[in-house]
Image (cartoon, rainbow, N blue to C red):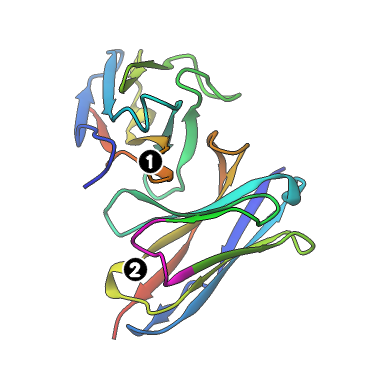
């Protein structure tokens, strides 16, 4: 059971906008920034969004992140087939203290 | 370019020991915090351990505390994970991960090395 809670699955059709939620607590998301990682099938995870809403160089602006209170969200607009992957949220937890991940959300492009 | 290359993953019997290595290149290794993260087959990501740039600050997940030891050799640009008292549930791909600065984010991941614990 993960400290951060994500829906196990999400889906959308090409061109659609989808959103993936990540719920935590005051000691993690409520106190620290949230990062998102994308894991394409058979590959290592890759940084997708950092510091709640920042995109690393090379990440399309179709990907955006937001945070409010103890929850965060990843949005993908203009969904493409290559976006089919597992997505994980993560944050530092002050109470533990260490990094915590969400359980991951498998995104399917229909 | 930044490269993190893990090695040392093998098939090991329950109760056995193993040391994973991560060779870093393309950046000043001694400037960065480093972590180990694992992923069991078909499962999600699990953070395991964190070591500060100097090695003075170390944290472990409860699941490996007392069994695993993280260390680094800044002169050799290398990160290590000594794994003792291995269990079947330690079977996973182990990733070496760079942290941009303390408590920030993981900006580079290695390709992973598979550890299988089975009799």
Q: Which quarter of the picture shows residue A64?
A: top left
Q: Residues within 10 Å of mark 2 (few under 14, many from 20)?
A: many
Horizontal side of residue B109 vs B16, given as left or right: right
Q: Which quadrant holds the C terminus of chain A?
A: top left
Q: Secondary structure at mark 1?
A: loop
Q: Which mark is residue B98?
A: none
Residue B111 shows in this picture: no
Residue A79 shows in this picture: yes
Q: Residue at x 48, y 72 (%)?
A: B9
Verify whether residue B34 appears in magenta. no
Q: Which quarter of the picture shows residue B21?
A: bottom right
Q: Report x, y in % for residue B52.
A: 63, 50
Q: Chain letter of disc 2? A: B
Q: Report x, y in % for residue B48.
A: 43, 56
* Residue in the foreground of this view, choosing between A87 and A91: A91
Verify whether residue B65 appears in magenta. yes
Horizontal side of residue B40 vs B98, given as left or right: left
Q: Main secondary structure of the magenta part?
A: loop
**Height in image: A98 above or below A105?**
below
Badge count: 2
Q: Chain letter of disc 1? A: A
Q: Are marks 1 and 2 on the same chain?
A: no
Residue picked out by circle 1: A95
Query: Which is more foreground, mark 1 or mark 2?
Result: 1
Residue range in magenta is B61-68
Q: Residue at x 34, y 68 (%)?
A: B90
* Residue in the foreground of this view, choosing between A31 and A19: A31
Residue picked out by circle 2: B90
Q: Residues within 10 Å of mark 1 (few under 14, many from 20)?
A: few
Q: Residue at x 27, y 52 (%)?
A: B43
């Amino acid at each position: 059971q993960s400290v951060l809670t994500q829906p196990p699955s999400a889906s959308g059709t090409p061109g659609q906008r989808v959103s993936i939620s990540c719920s935590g607590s005051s000691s993690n998301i409520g106190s620290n920034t949230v990062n998102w990682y994308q894991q394409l099938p058979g590959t290592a995870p890759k940084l997708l969004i950092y510091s709640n809403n920042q995109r690393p160089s090379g990440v399309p602006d179709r990907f955006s992140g937001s945070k409010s209170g103890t929850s965060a969200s990843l949005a993908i607009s203009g969904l493409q087939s290559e976006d089919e992957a597992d997505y994980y949220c993560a944050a530092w937890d002050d109470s533990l203290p260490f990094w915590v991940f969400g359980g991951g959300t498998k995104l399917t492009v229909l | 370019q930044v490269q993190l290359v893990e090695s040392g993953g093998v098939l090991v019997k329950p109760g056995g020991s193993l040391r994973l290595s991560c060779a870093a290149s393309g950046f000043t290794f001694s400037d960065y915090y480093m972590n180990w993260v694992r992923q069991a087959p078909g499962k999600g990501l699990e953070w395991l351990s964190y070591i500060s740039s100097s090695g003075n600050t170390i944290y472990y997940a409860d699941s490996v505390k007392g069994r695993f030891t993280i260390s680094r050799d800044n002169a050799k640009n290398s990160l290590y994970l000594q794994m003792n008292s291995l269990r079947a549930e330690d079977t996973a791909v182990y990733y070496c991960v760079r942290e941009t600065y303390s408590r920030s984010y993981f900006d580079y991941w290695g390709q992973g090395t598979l550890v299988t614990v089975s009799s």
